[in-house]
Amino acid sequence: MPPLVSVIMPAYNAENFLSDSINSVLAQTFSNWELIITDDGSIDNTKAVIESFCTKDVRIKYLYQENGGQGKARNLGLSTSKGKYIAFLDADDLWLPEKLEVQIKQLEENKVDLVFSDCWVFNNTISDSTHTLDAAKGIFQGDTALVFFLEKNGIPTLTVLIKADVLNTIKGFSEKRSIQNAEDYHLWLRLLINGYIFYGSELILAGYREHLHSATHTDKFAISKVVEALMDLKDKHRSHGPVINTYLKRWFKKYHYLSNNWDLVTYKDLIKRNCSYTNNSRYNFIFQMSLQVFGLKVTRKLLNRIVNG
């Protein structure tokens, strides 16, 4: 009997693309799966779309929660899952038909805890795609891997297959609202800190749909969530604090450069976060005084010099 794979899909106001995503699971060459879809408080026709599939295939299950973010939605799905392995697919993305079949073999043959692959980036159909997300490739383990992924999140969530017992041990995704949209990155880094082994395949096994509400269109805000995620990891994993702090500074620098249109109130918050990650509260007083005396333009230059220092 082949192992059961639990596919976890959070869905929020996903009526436009949800059917395509579900159909890409139905089209898998590997058939021993359950698809658990958590409706994260949608106010469109998401529920009706899901229930129409549930009546046709008993492997598809519908859950509902008040809007709580992707981490909470995925954890709810995980709490009811029965699979030996867990896969993730967002409600606007697609899998290629061989995705699960190939990755189960990769997971078992490479004796790793998590496998992932690259994926096409597309707007309408995968066949129109001309580029990928350029996911990482190879075996990743230990501090070297942690440094590699602190530089860049090279793991597309929609391509991940992971052992269920690993996720249970690490207690799933963070549900902190401040890091939602980076909760997947937060999880990969936690797994590496705790000694788990990843394998990134050369194959392309999925499609990431780029549209108005996707992460690539809200990059500035996703970066702010990464900053918060790294802050959380630094606080909880003190032994890895110095290396996390190095890359936290780099991510904050990138966020700072993209934050050209913040108003004064929001910029004050930006300063507080910078001072928090540098563990130097006196900077906060200096920056706040600079805002009062010299204004936003001069303060931006001062903060930029500190971030670059």
Image: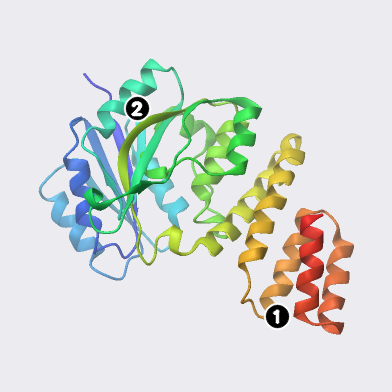
- Residue furthest toward the front? 130
Three-letter code, disc 1: Leu
Asked whether the viewer can see residue 160, the reply is: no
Residue 307 position within the rendered picture, expressed as x and y whole percent measured from the top left: 77, 58
In the image, what residue type sits under mark 2? Lys
Of residues 207 and 239, which is closer to you in this image?
207
Residue drawn at x 20%, y 30% is 30
Name the mark on residue 84.
Answer: 2
Position of residue 17 measured from the top left corner of the image (x, y, whole percent): 25, 59
Q: Residue furthest left?
A: 56
Percent across and percent down for residue 212 are 37, 67
Label 2 CA crowd tier, 10 Å (few <14, some 14–19, many 20+): some
In the displayed structure, does residue 40 sit left or right of residue 255?
left
Q: Which quadrant holds the C terminus? A: bottom right
Comparing 168 with 126, the one in front is: 126
Q: Give SS at disc 2.
A: loop
Work out whether residue 21 or residue 218 is closer to the camera in this orientation and state it: 218
Q: Which residue is mark 1?
A: 264
Is the C-beta separation of discs 1 and 2 under 8 Å? no
- Residue 283 is left or right of residue 158, and the answer is right
Residue 200 versus residue 66 in the image, above or below: above
Residue mark closest to the camera, 1 vs 2:
1
